[in-house]
Image (cartoon, rainbow, N blue to C red):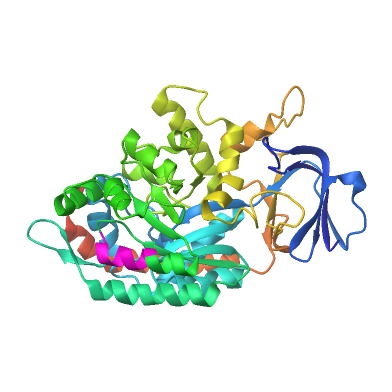
Amino acid sequence: MDLAIVDTTLITFQGEGLGVIEKGGLGIMGNEIAFVGKSDDLRGADEVIDGSGCVTMPGLIDSHAHTWLALLKGGAQDMPEIQWMKKGLEPFVNHMNKKDRIAGSKLGVLEGLRTGTTTFCEFSPEVKGYVENVYLPFGVRTVAVETLNEVVGVDARGLYELDRSIGEEGLKKADALVDEYKRSEMVYPGYGPQALDMVTIELLEEVKENAWDSKSDIHMHVAQGERERLQVEKRYGARTVKIMYDMGMLDEKLVAVHCHDTEIEEKGMLVENGVRMVGCPSSIGMIDGIVPPIHDLLSMGGEVGVGTDQAPGPGGHNMFKEMRNAALLTKIRDKDPTRLPSGDVLKLATIGGARTLGIQHLVGSLEVGKLADIITIDMLCANLTPSVFEPFHNFVATLVHSSTGKEVRDVIINGKEVMRKGEFVKIDEGHIIKDAQGRGKDLFKRGAKDWKDADGSLVKTNF
């Protein structure tokens, strides 16, 4: 073995349960897991990590993120959903340059890494820039989705004006991305029409054909709130799920994000047609005041992952926070404390996320032959102590409900140590934070006039 973790508690996610192994050991050879079992049976590693007092588990999977928006953290919260994009985000986004976006993405990925995320689904325009400047240099796995958006303005009816030429240019970039990274071991490319209200039907038809031809997935915001619904009903006279069903877009190639503005029949249509879904509880709770239907879709037999979405909504990219909020908000919504138990929530952020993104054969569980994306979590912290095995594994619940994410000690991606004993091995964390702080202050200053002129509700609140 090149690297081994010994005397640890493994959560493998093998089988129907969580696959907990006490006094476990894990061995890595190259970029793959080569041994999973009892520590006493593990022999001969070049480097050994003492995992005593730690839980060792697969790295977390953030199934939907726009990390570049981390530079606008706190900039579009506590305002009505109908205003959020146009009067909250856009006045500042319109002033962002390429260096701002890269700095934001580095900041977002840095937070995710520190709190145990090893795979991000990056859903962004010009996503290749983030792959080349953030994900590959950091050594982080990514599902890279090129966002396609044709909106150029708003007409007299209040409908978005769409420009097909913008969509065609975006599609060329997505096709090139898919072609370049289709054989990559760290980057898995996909197509990302932003939402049904933001692209033409003609573009969606092209995307569907290209995705099938290239064996790639389509990631798309689907039924994501009142703003989308009003636009779609005005333009087409029907709801998003019905239109996409009639187009033949509800199939196993689609990863549908959010889905909280759906009726029970529409949820059934998504699940029955093999659509995979992503819920973003912190973001949608903050932006829409709605709890995503994660439990509903799971109970119908759907494949579901969890994502952080974007920092101006929930505040950051911490999957432990997402797990806790997914469980807690669902229990409150349904007035049922048995909904989304802790073990199921841990699966959402690991093997469930892998299945949702179509990479379950590579990551998401600790199994021999899978890629070595692994984290260790120090359980000997006040908020996670005590950690016991009898009469049940209490640490499953404490990981979901008591962890802040900062207890993550080691992060290994593709067999390489990215963080060791709480310190990044090669990433200059201080420089990234300092650069983001300076750029963030300047960006908010540049966008201040446009933000005030947009006259959103936050302008009147203005702390």
Q: Is residue 414 left or right of residue 290?
A: right
Q: Is residue 72 above or below residue 240?
A: below
Residue 168 sits inside the magenta stretch: no
Residue 247: x percent and y percent?
30, 55
Residue at (56, 50) in percent of width and height:
355
Secondary structure that dominates the magenta span: helix
Total marks placed: 0
Q: Nearer the viewer, residue 443 or 142?
A: 142
Residue 200: x percent and y percent?
24, 64
Q: Is residue 345 above or below residue 50?
A: above
Q: Is residue 307 above or below residue 97?
A: above
Q: Nearer the viewer, residue 27 or 454?
A: 27
Residue 269: x percent and y percent?
37, 41
Looking at the rendering, the stretch of residues picked out in magenta corresponds to: 198-208
> Could you tell me if residue 405 is visible in this image?
no
In terms of image quadrants, where is residue 39?
Answer: top right
Q: Is residue 425 left or right of residue 449?
A: right
Q: Is residue 138 left or right of residue 86?
A: right
In terms of image quadrants, where is residue 381?
Answer: top right
